[in-house]
Image (spheres, grey):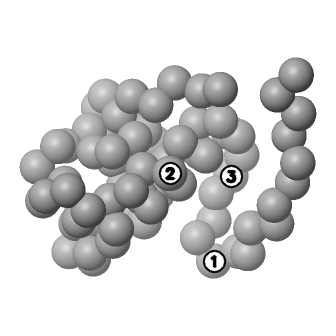
Amino acid sequence: MTEESYTSGTSFVDNEEPVKENYNKARRVYRGLFVTNQGVQINADLNGAYQILKKAFPIKWDRGCVLHPIVVSMA
């Protein structure tokens, strides 16, 4: 489990860290649509999910790489 604050108002596409300093709720145009700093439109839930992953697994995230799923034990 991880804390999800600032994940819906920060941009995964722009490689922003999900922290208060980067948070801008105006980029979440409406439910389901997020607009990046460069004007790229992305599904808001997908952007938030990627930002939550970024918080849960603090590694160097490169949008050009393919993510390989791993099994994480929650027990």
- Indicate left or right for 47 with 54 as reference: left
Camera-nearest residue between 24 and 29: 29
What residue is at 88 percent from the left and 22 percent from the top?
A: 75
Q: Nearer the viewer, mark 1 or mark 2?
A: 2
* Quadrant hosting residue 6: top left
Residue 24 position, x and y percent, is: 19, 43
Mark 2: amino acid? Ala
Q: Can residue 27 be seen in this snapshot?
A: no
Q: Is residue 58 left or right of residue 46?
A: right
Q: Residues within 10 Å of mark 1 (few under 14, many from 20)?
A: few
Residue at x-position 27% and y-position 77%: 40
Horizontal and vertical percent position of residue 29:
12, 59
Q: Compare marks 1 and 2 and give the one earlier in the sequence.
A: 2
Which amino acid does the dot numbered 3 rest on?
Answer: Lys
**Residue behind mark 3:** 60
Q: Are marks 1 and 3 in contact (CB under 8 Å)?
A: no
Q: Which residue is mark 2?
A: 49
Separation (CA) of disc 1 from disc 2: 17 Å
- Residue type, label 1: Gly
Let me know if residue 9 appears in the view: yes
Earlier-in-chain disc, 2 versus 3:
2
Label 2 neighbourhood size at 10 Å, few (<14), some (14-19), many (20+)?
some
Q: Residue at x 63, y 77 (%)?
A: 64
Residue indicated by mark 1 = 64
